[in-house]
Image: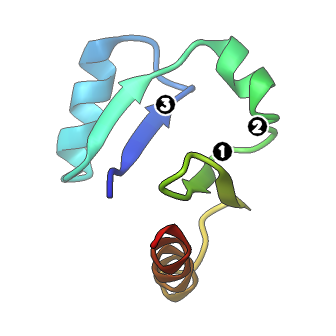
Amino acid sequence: MTILSINLDLNTTDEVSKFARRHDARYRVGLAADSLATELSVSMLPTTYLFAADGSLFKRYTGGPPEQVFVRDIDAALVKSK
C-alpha cells in the first residue's frame, strides 16, 4: 500500500518539506498543479481519495474522515484488491 499526500495550498517544495516535518509525515508528500484539483473535483481541503490496487477509485472523503472510518475503508479496499 502507498500513501501519498498531494498539497494544493502550498507553493514550494520547501513549504511541503516543512509541512511533512511539522506533521511527522511517514508518507510521501508532494505538490500538485491547480489543474489536478479541477480534474478531481476538489471543492474543499482536505479531500482524500482511496484507490483500490487496480487503480479504481474506492472512496472519496471531503473533510477529514474519522480514523476508524478510514481504517475500515482501507481494510475493505485491501480485501477488494485480492
Q: Position of residue 57 (x, y in %)?
A: 68, 52
Q: Is residue 75 above or below residue 4?
A: below
Which label sits on residue 16? none
Q: Amino acid at mark 1?
A: Leu
Mark 2 → mark 3, Cα distance in angstroms: 12 Å
Looking at marks 1 and 3 on the same chain, the residue that comes earlier in the sequence is marked by 3
Depth check: give the residue in front, 68 or 22. 68
**Residue on which the image places disc 2:** 42
Q: Position of residue 46 (x, y in %)?
A: 61, 49
Q: Quadrant of the N terminus?
A: bottom left
Q: Amino acid at mark 2?
A: Val
**Residue on which the image places disc 3:** 7
Q: Residues within 10 Å of mark 3 (few under 14, many from 20)?
A: many
Looking at marks 2 and 3 on the same chain, the residue that comes earlier in the sequence is marked by 3
Q: Is residue 69 above or below residue 3?
A: below
Depth check: give the residue in front, 80 or 29. 80
**Residue on which the image places disc 1:** 45
Q: Which SS class for mark 3?
A: strand
Q: Is residue 37 above or below residue 60?
A: above
